[in-house]
Image (cartoon, rainbow, N blue to C red):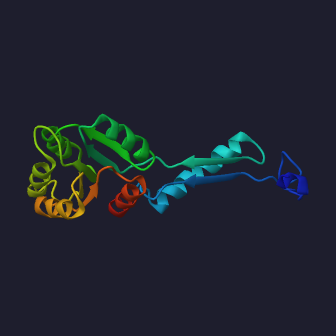
Amino acid sequence: QSVESLKIEHSKSPSHPSMSLSIGGAVSLKTTGRNLEELIILADKALYKAKELGRNSVHVEESKPVKRVLLADNDPSTVEKLGKTLSHHCQLLTTDNGVDCVELVKRTQPDLILLDENLPKMDGSEVCQTLKQLHETAAIPIILVSSLNREERLSLGKEAGANDSLQKPLNEQHLLSKICQYLR
């Protein structure tokens, strides 16, 4: 049932004698990097869109991600899987080797780097050390991804200067939890 069926008088309306209701809303995942003010602006746009659609309409705007995550991994299946997992949470940049990773980070300044340890041309540890030594990239969080056991992975990550580490194969929920932690 619509608000209109309640027949609430609307004496000031030149077009219709009873009240109607239009609703606009905005939704966002917490990893997209949107703040409350941006969501209110999106909801306002959605309200006007609902009004354009006619009486008793609802329209919702979905917030697009503004945070950028660089995934450095040379395994196409991992890149494809993570691309699907992360597409609603962030803008995903990818590279398949360490040398290009360093250059891409300098150029794009991502908000987070998911860095595979086993990259060609320059391994993940070297990339991490290089980025942490550069003034313009030192503050970017790096999550080192490796198939090593927990102790070896933590030791390697600490030695390289990584902010965190994850074990391959990646658990989707654990990955999203880590990403949320760094994309606030």
Viewed as shown, does residue 54 lie left or right of 78? right
**Mark count:** 0
- Determine the residue positioned at 42% across, 48% down: 65
Report the front residue among 88 and 1: 88
- In the displayed structure, does residue 68 sit left or right of residue 136? right
Which of these two is toward me, 179 or 1?
Answer: 179
List x then y, in percent, for residue 159.
Answer: 11, 62
Q: Give the answer, above or below, for where 50 lies relative to 35.
A: above
Question: What is the residue that sits farthest to the top in this orientation?
Answer: 76
Furthest toward the front, the residue is 149
Closer to us: 3 or 157: 157
Where is residue 155 drawn, in percent x and y?
Answer: 15, 64
Q: Position of residue 80 (x, y in %)?
A: 37, 37
Quarter of the figure that contains the C terminus: bottom left
For the point 31% across and 48% down, the residue is 69
User: In the rendered image, which quarter is residue 34 located in?
Assistant: bottom left
Residue drawn where x is 13% and y is 52% of the image: 125
Compared to residue 57, the image places residue 35 above or below, namely below
Find residue 35 and report its horizontal and vertical position in percent. 44, 60
